[in-house]
Image: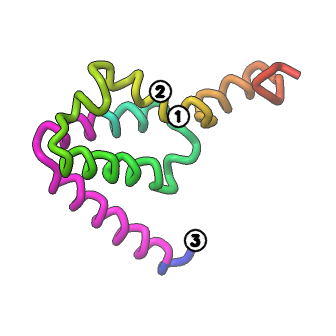
Amino acid sequence: MSIQDIIEGKKQWRAHVARVKALPPDYRIVYKEMQRYLFKVGPVGLSDGSLLSGIVDFFDEGVAAGTGVLELVGDDVAAFCDDLIKDSRTYADIYQESISGSGGPTGR
């Protein structure tokens, strides 16, 4: 990774944070909870930024439509997040495979 890549990544993250800050307070609170949950669960592809920016896009549409954030995601934010990443490999999956020595999620 070059210095330019690092600088570009920081610019993109700052722009993302600015978009989050522009959300209404209730949306910001739910976004932060989703972000915290996703960072804890650790989908492998999270670092590319598309999942988090996709959530902000989804929230922007909800704000524009006048929809409440809980109408979009439901009362169980963790379940909503789990559904978003249900087909994604997580770092927990990789760890589980390493300790079981299975080499794959089916144990084969």
Kindly state the secondary structure of the residue where label 3 is placed.
loop
Q: Is residue 82 above or below residue 42?
A: above
Q: Nearer the viewer, residue 6 or 50?
A: 50
Type of amino acid at the residue the image marks with label 1: Ile
Kindly state the secondary structure of the residue where label 2 is placed.
helix
Residue density around tag 2, few if under 14, some if 14–19, many if 20 or more, within 10 Å:
some
Separation of disc 3 and disc 2 at Cα? 31 Å
Q: Main secondary structure of the magenta part?
A: helix
All told, the count of numbered labels is: 3
Type of amino acid at the residue the image marks with label 3: Met
Quadrant where the image shows the C terminus: top right
Residue 6 locus on image (x, y percent): 46, 71
Tell which circle, 3 or 2, labels the residue nearer the N-terminal end: 3
Type of amino acid at the residue the image marks with label 2: Asp
Residue density around tag 1, few if under 14, some if 14–19, many if 20 or more, within 10 Å:
some
Identify the mark at residue 1; answer none if there is no mark.
Answer: 3
Q: Is residue 106 left or right of residue 11?
A: right
Identify the mark at residue 82; answer none if there is no mark.
Answer: 2
Residue 59 locus on image (x, y percent): 27, 46
Residue density around tag 3, few if under 14, some if 14–19, many if 20 or more, within 10 Å:
few
Tell which circle, 3 or 1, labels the residue nearer the N-terminal end: 3
Q: Is residue 12 left or right of residue 102?
A: left
Mark 3 and mark 2 residues within 8 Å of each other at the beta carbon: no
Q: Disc 1 designates what residue?
A: 85
Separation of disc 2 and disc 1 at Cα? 5 Å
Q: Please state the extent of the stretch shown in magenta in the rendering.
A: 5-33
Kindly state the secondary structure of the residue where label 1 is placed.
loop
